[in-house]
Amino acid sequence: MTYYILTIDFGSTYTKGVLLDREKEVVISQATVNTYSKANLLDSYQELNGVLAQKLKIDKLKIDQTLICSSAFGGFKMVAIGLTNSLTADAARKVALGAGTRILKTYAYALSFEDIQEINTLKPDVILLTGGVNGGNTSFILMCAQRLTALEDDIPIIVAGNSLAIPELKNILSQRNYVISENVLPKVNCLQTTKTRQLLRRIFFDKIIYAKGLEEIAKLSDSPIIPTPMAVLEAAKLLSEGTSYEDGIGSVAIVDIGGATTDVHSASNGLTAEEDVLYEGLPEPFLKRTVEGDLGMRYSAVSLMETAGIASFSDFSGQAYDERQIRQFCLKREQTPEFIPASIVERDFDCLMAKVATRIAVKRHAGTIRRERHPHHDTYYQKGKDLRHLSALIGTGGVMIHSGQAREILEAALQKEQEHLMPKTPQLYIDGSYLLSSLGLLSEQYPCVALRMLKKSLIPL
């Protein structure tokens, strides 16, 4: 008996499809086609079906179930608002990224009329309004809500702040499209994400799918369409935790190097086990995602160079590059995003960029530890996520898969300075068949099947 599932990932440039046999737990075929305009997104779907059928030498695909994720048309765009950068705005960022959104801007301390005009220009898909612990400051969130009523578009607003302000907030926002969630920061250093992430997922499907011309595609899916980053996070979670019937592989981080960004996803507790270490700042969520918009291989290649500095390129290459050479290489890639390296020199420079991007992205994703000296003892303070004892580090993205240097690229993520809590000795893998998002989609309904397929798909280095 067979049961065929088609998973589709609609990206801004490409649409990827994977045909799976659920019963045999194997990939039947894979294909990639161009993503067309909003009006013709069905064309991408139909072309994908045609290519898969052609590969299998059949007239028409037999599909029992279709599952879809999407990052097309700029993804799921959010503006986050919080009382302070260090607490509620940071909490909002953590919740938003963990839900697969793309944060356009974060506002803190005040929301001015100029900020409202900027939000009008940014045109986010959703606004996350936070501020104040429960029972604390209400003036900030009430002022922000009042200002948001002046927005030109009826953008969905998720209110996830001080519960004391809810009665007044309901009155202020009565003519707007809003929903009340639990406070993301109910008390100092206590992060709550579950309900807000669920609401973000619902808004993505109920509102964004139709606003972005995906309604015909939504009819083809047997489950709600979710953002692609959320599918990858689900894969990381499943790999880490396993199921009731099958063990996972322990704490996991995934490095995804793309043309515009380098994304890091992790599924780990991230607290140090050492007794003499105190934690400061917001606790890190088990599922964490960071997106580095200045660390891309093509669209942000020059930003990568400027962020890293010339010395970083020389450190990884073992040879002295001058600034003019590096700038020329990076400009070429930024001005021609479709560039594919043909020569050894160009391929090596792509790998060099990937190492630099990986190093910085994982360093930003990981936490830090600092020592405070005292006369009779030292005290250590951890901030952020401890990845030192990570079990598995997984690489994905074109340069990882095709360069032949995936191990060297991932090794750039390993700890070199004690103050940065980066992985020490994880098992290194690559997602050799681009199956993370596909099997993340599968995991919601068929977790055991997805887990076994994920384990088989990872290539150890």
Image: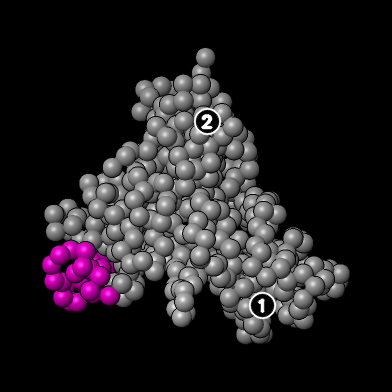
| For residue 427, side relative to residue 452 (left or right) | left
Residue identifier under label 1: 83
What is the quadrant of the C terminus in the image?
A: top left
Q: Residues within 10 Å of mark 2 (few under 14, many from 20)?
A: few
Dominant secondary structure of the magenta stretch?
helix
Query: In the image, which residues are magenta?
Result: 309-337
- Element at badge 2? loop
x and y percentages locating residue 413 in the rendered image: 33, 58
Q: Give the quadrant of residue 345.
A: bottom left
Q: Relative to the observer, which residue lies in front, 135 or 447?
A: 135
| Label disc, if present, on residue 47 of the rendered structure | none
Q: Give the quadrant of residue 78.
A: bottom right
Identify the residue at horizontal 82%, vertical 71% (top origin): 164
Q: Amino acid at mark 1?
A: Leu
Identify the residue at horizontal 50%, vertical 34% (top origin): 247
| For residue 269, side relative to residue 335 (left or right) | right
Residue 310 belongs to magenta span: yes
Picture layout, residue 63 above or below residue 194: above
Identify the residue at horizontal 35%, vertical 55% (top origin): 424
**Which numbered disc, 2 or 1, marks the residue closer to the eye?**
2
Picture layout, residue 252 above or below residue 4: below
Q: Residues within 10 Å of mark 1 (few under 14, many from 20)?
A: many
x and y percentages locating residue 15 in the rendered image: 44, 45
Q: Amino acid at mark 2?
A: Glu
- Element at badge 1? loop
Picture layout, residue 181 above or below residue 53: below
